[in-house]
């Protein structure tokens, strides 16, 4: 059953074999034995792709839960329910990996030294099933309805700039002043209008600037270097605030918060994946106070 789930997640006999360190013929033979035992075809096999049949999809959903229940029962029997073990594969954006996940892995491994991590930090969305990801962290509204998700936090967003930039360009006093400043803009932003709120007040400001980037790390560096004002979440600027690399601009105003979700493929969030998601959630609450 574990082998079946690994093949389904990998979408390939050869990839599953490589991940597990066994030969592809062994994987194929064991899957054939399982299909014979169940008297059901679990996979549709073509020269180009491997996909689950309807019976395979039903068996996959049940198998994931059964294996998770078994792991919990085994851990309880061994007295390891508070001592998770094994590999946890994580996926998130590069900047989120650097600013949030990496520091939390360090503190998590001090609590649970028998857990190993494999982190995929990419600014494009990772195929969770295809890459065998146990837990992904995603910002903003979710679009893939086939995945399971749990909201961890809302990430408030505010305006930040370096003291050097504000000394050179002046400090905005009201949102309308931003039209005369250099904005640092995410390339994937749907609009160059920043919507800011202050209690019941709401202002839409069209912004522009000489620098755009697709990654948060690059924008943070540009802000630190005095290239402009950035609209960012507290988690992204957390390293810069205490060192005075960046300061809050228009501190009474903020933008709409972005939700942060933990996302996984199927079943309930359990074991070390749930422990780590909860661990990160606590850190995100602290970071939210920056805005």
Image (cartoon, rainbow, N blue to C red):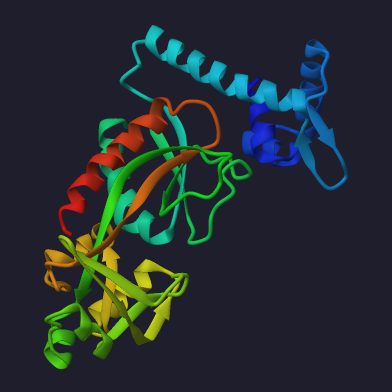
Q: Position of residue 235 (x, y in %)?
A: 26, 57
The quarter of the picture where residue 28 lies is top right
The quarter of the picture where residue 234 lies is bottom left
Q: Position of residue 85 (x, y in %)?
A: 41, 26
170 displayed left or right of 34: left
The quarter of the picture where residue 204 lies is bottom left
Would you place residue 78 above or below residue 154 in this image?
Answer: above
- In the picture, the quarter occupied by the C terminus is bottom left
Residue 21 visible in the displayed image: no
182 displayed left or right of 69: left
Residue found 43% across the figure and 73% down from its top? 191
Would you place residue 247 above or below residue 1 in this image?
Answer: below
Residue situated in front as seen by the camera: 101 or 154:
154
Residue found 76% across the figure and 23% down from its top? 55
**Residue sitting at the far top:** 77
Residue situated in front as seen by the camera: 11 or 228:
228
Q: Position of residue 112 (x, y in %)?
A: 31, 30
- In the picture, the quarter occupied by the N terminus is top right
Residue found 56% across the figure and 16% down from its top? 66
55 displayed left or right of 286: right
Residue 98 visible in the displayed image: yes
Residue found 42% across the figure and 37% down from its top? 116
Would you place residue 184 above or below residue 105 in this image?
Answer: below
**Residue sitting at the far right:** 47
Q: Position of residue 248 (x, y in %)?
A: 15, 70
145 displayed left or right of 26: left
């Amino acid at each position: 059953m574990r082998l079946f789930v690994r093949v389904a997640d990998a979408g390939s006999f050869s990839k599953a074999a490589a991940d597990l360190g066994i030969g592809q013929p062994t994987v194929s033979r064991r899957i054939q034995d399982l299909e014979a035992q169940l008297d059901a075809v679990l996979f549709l096999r073509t020269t180009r792709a491997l996909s689950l049949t309807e019976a395979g999809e039903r068996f996959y959903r049940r198998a994931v839960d059964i294996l998770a229940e078994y792991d919990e029962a085994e851990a309880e029997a061994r007295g390891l329910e508070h001592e998770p073990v094994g590999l946890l594969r994580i996926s998130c954006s590069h900047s989120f990996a650097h600013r949030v996940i990496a520091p939390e892995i360090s503190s998590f491994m001090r609590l649970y030294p028998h857990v190993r991590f494999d982190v995929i930090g990419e600014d494009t969305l990772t195929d969770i099933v295809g890459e065998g990801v146990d837990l992904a962290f995603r910002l903003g509204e979710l679009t893939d309805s086939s995945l399971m998700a749990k909201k961890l936090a809302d990430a408030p967003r505010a305006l930040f700039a370096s003291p050097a930039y504000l000394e050179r360009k002046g400090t905005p006093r009201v949102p309308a002043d931003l039209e005369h400043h250099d904005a640092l803009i995410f390339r994937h932003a749907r609009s160059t209008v920043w919507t800011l709120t202050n209690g019941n007040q709401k202002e839409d400001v069209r912004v522009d600037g000489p620098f755009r980037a697709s990654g948060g790390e690059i924008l943070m560096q540009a802000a630190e270097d005095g290239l402009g004002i950035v609209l960012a979440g507290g988690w992204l600027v957390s390293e810069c605030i205490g060192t005075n690399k960046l300061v809050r601009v228009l501190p009474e105003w903020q933008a709409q918060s972005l939700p942060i979700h933990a996302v996984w493929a199927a079943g309930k969030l359990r074991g070390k994946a749930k422990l780590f998601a909860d661990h990160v959630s606590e850190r995100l609450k602290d970071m939210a106070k920056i805005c």
